[in-house]
Amino acid sequence: MTADNLSITNLTVPEFSAAMTSGKTFRLSDYRGKNLVLYFYPKDNTPGCTAESMHFRDLMPEFTAHDTEIFGVSRDSLRSHENFKGKLGLPFELISDPDETLCLMFNVMKIKSMYGKQARGVERSTFLIDVDGKLVKEWRGLKVPGHVDNVLDLIKTMA
């Protein structure tokens, strides 16, 4: 399966596993029966990523009430993730993807321009996977303000 295939909604997301905080391993199949939010972000401890993570944290009870698990994903190390998670009091796990396996699978690596220089990095993106493991919605190249609310609003419409 190619990364481009993940831009097709109602596609079953292929099984994958990855290291995450708290010494755990994420396995997609472990979460069948729950909705999943995977939000990809560029870097721990940056303003936009901090704001986005805090908003997911603050609305976590509402996501939980709608049978939804949240996972943040970036290329940062587990050590960096543990520090970021602890500093912000995040109630969900962060997935470390230093070799970009998930970033490539979900096609979130992009060439970005910053201060006139081009660099390859993670495009802020969120993916909603339903209880059957199907991709329901993707948000790509998004802006942080209002985004988490939009994700929650869609989840509330899913029965």
Image: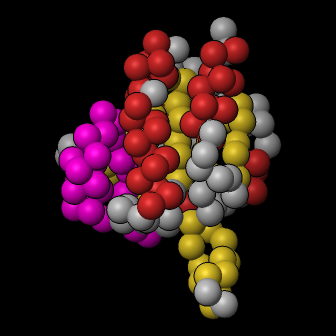
Q: Is residue 117 above or below residue 60?
A: below
| Color theme of the render | secondary structure
* Residue 26 image position (x, y, % from top left): 37, 41
Residue in the foreground of this view, choosing between 128 and 1:
128
Q: Is residue 43 left or right of residue 8?
A: left
Magenta span:
77-99
Residue most extreme to the right: 8
One can see residue 54 in this view: yes
Residue most extreme to the bottom: 117
Q: Quadrant of residue 109?
A: bottom right
Q: Is 159 one of the magenta-colored residues?
A: no
Q: Residue at x 22, y 61 (%)?
A: 79
* Residue 151 image position (x, y, % from top left): 63, 32
Instruction: Locate the C terminus and report the quarter of the image it occupies.
Output: top right
Q: Residue at x 75, y 57 (%)?
A: 4
Residue in the foreground of this view, choosing between 101 and 48:
48
Q: Is residue 13 above or below residue 7?
A: above
Q: Quadrant of residue 93?
A: top left
Q: Residue at x 67, y 81 (%)?
A: 113
Q: Residue at x 48, y 22 (%)?
A: 63
Q: Is residue 135 left or right of residue 131?
A: right
Give the total number of marks visible in the rendering: 0
